[in-house]
Image (spheres, rainbow, N blue to C red):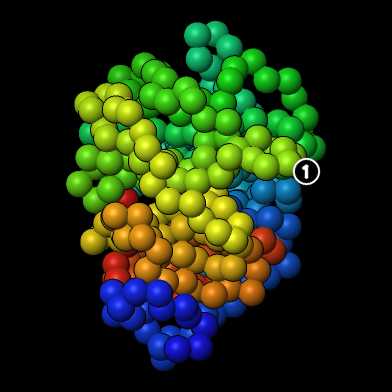
Amino acid sequence: MDGFEVLDARFAGMVLPNAPLQLLAEGFAWLEGPVWFADHEVLLFSDIPNDRIMRWTEAGVSVFRSPSHFSNGQTRDRQGRLITCSHRHRNITRTELDGSISVLADRFEGKRLNSPNDVVVKSDGSIWFTDPHYGINTDYEGGKQGAELPALVYRLDPGGGLEIVADDFEGPNGLCFSPDETLLYVCESGKQFAEAPRRFIRVFEVEGKSLGAGRVFHKVEPGFADGICVDEAGNIWSSAGDGVHCISPEGVLLGKILVPHSVSNLTFGGRNRSRLFICAGQHLYAIYTNTRGCAVP
Ligand code: MG
């Protein structure tokens, strides 16, 4: 099968040998934060260094929001509203149905967040997000600013309270729940510019509003896991240096979709949530698969 690496027989049934990787658009600076709007058949995604959120449809690509304040990860809440991480403004925002933008979190105990990177919403309406230093380390991705807090993972209660759920990361990055929400997967992408950064996917048991002890779930190589998403069967689909890796719930690498550029983030979308949208550096790709993502909402 051209364009794939099948490492486990289970993977052969998840992809389609006659569905090629499609280049949807290119010429961006650095893409992350893809989020699918099934109700509009629209993909929004962040072009971080260009300080804008882009909109893709089958008709083409346009600018959705500029400036985006160096937006990064995005998702939708259970009401379908857009939730966005901003590096420059160091916050999590919600775009309301009337188009106005509400700041949901920008401080913890009076100190400014660093640069929220990625975000997911649980079915109880709580918002879980990572807050590494990457976006305030460089002018390219948000503007150099001083850190006031360590790199942490947070849970924002629907009532507004912000709590730390993990404090032993060097660079928490992408995250996603298992389909039944009993597990939370979080990418550790390590200290930026370090010679040998800690890079692996960790998994935690979700215990109500907090997390149990985490363990290393899988180490992605080559490259590392920046963004991840989950399919209906609980397989984790991760960004990697050579494309997209599919990892079983037991942590076994099942196969790869090969992409000519390093992949940063990805999400399932399309009419049946079976089309994988892939942010790969300066390029936006998509590929139809034979699995379905657990999309929110
Ligand atoms: Mg990220």
Specify the quadrant of the image occupied by residue 83: top left
Q: From this view, report whether residue 258 is shown above or below residue 114.
A: below
Q: Is residue 40 visible?
A: no
- Residue indicated by mark 1: 140
Q: Nearer the viewer, residue 201 or 37?
A: 201
Q: Is residue 230 above or below residue 79?
A: below
Nearer the observer, 194 or 54: 194
Residue 213 percent across, percent down from the top left: 33, 28
Residue 68, by quadrant, is top right
Residue 254 drawn above or below residue 240: below
Who's the residue at 59% across and 77% down the image?
A: 23
Q: Residue at x 36, y 33 (%)?
A: 214
Residue 181 appears anywhere in the view: yes
Q: Quadrant of the N terminus?
A: bottom left
Q: How many marks?
A: 1
Q: Label 1 crowding class (10 Å Cα cut-off): few <14, some 14-19, many 20+? A: some
Dot 1: element: loop
Considering only vertical position in the picture, is 69 above or below 53? above
Residue 146, image x, y percentages: 73, 20
The three-letter amino acid code for the residue at tag 1 is Tyr
The percent coordinates of residue 135 (x first, y second) are 67, 36
Q: Which residue appears at 23% of the width and 28% of the height?
A: 207
Please name the residue shown 45% across and 34% down the image: 129
Q: In the rendered view, does 196 fall on the left or right side of 166?
A: right
Is 177 on the left-hand or right-hand side of 110? left
Ligand 1 within 8 Å of the CB at mark 1: no
Write down the quadrant of residue 242 in the picture: bottom right
237 vs 89, nearest the viewer: 237
Q: Position of residue 58 (x, y in %)?
A: 50, 75
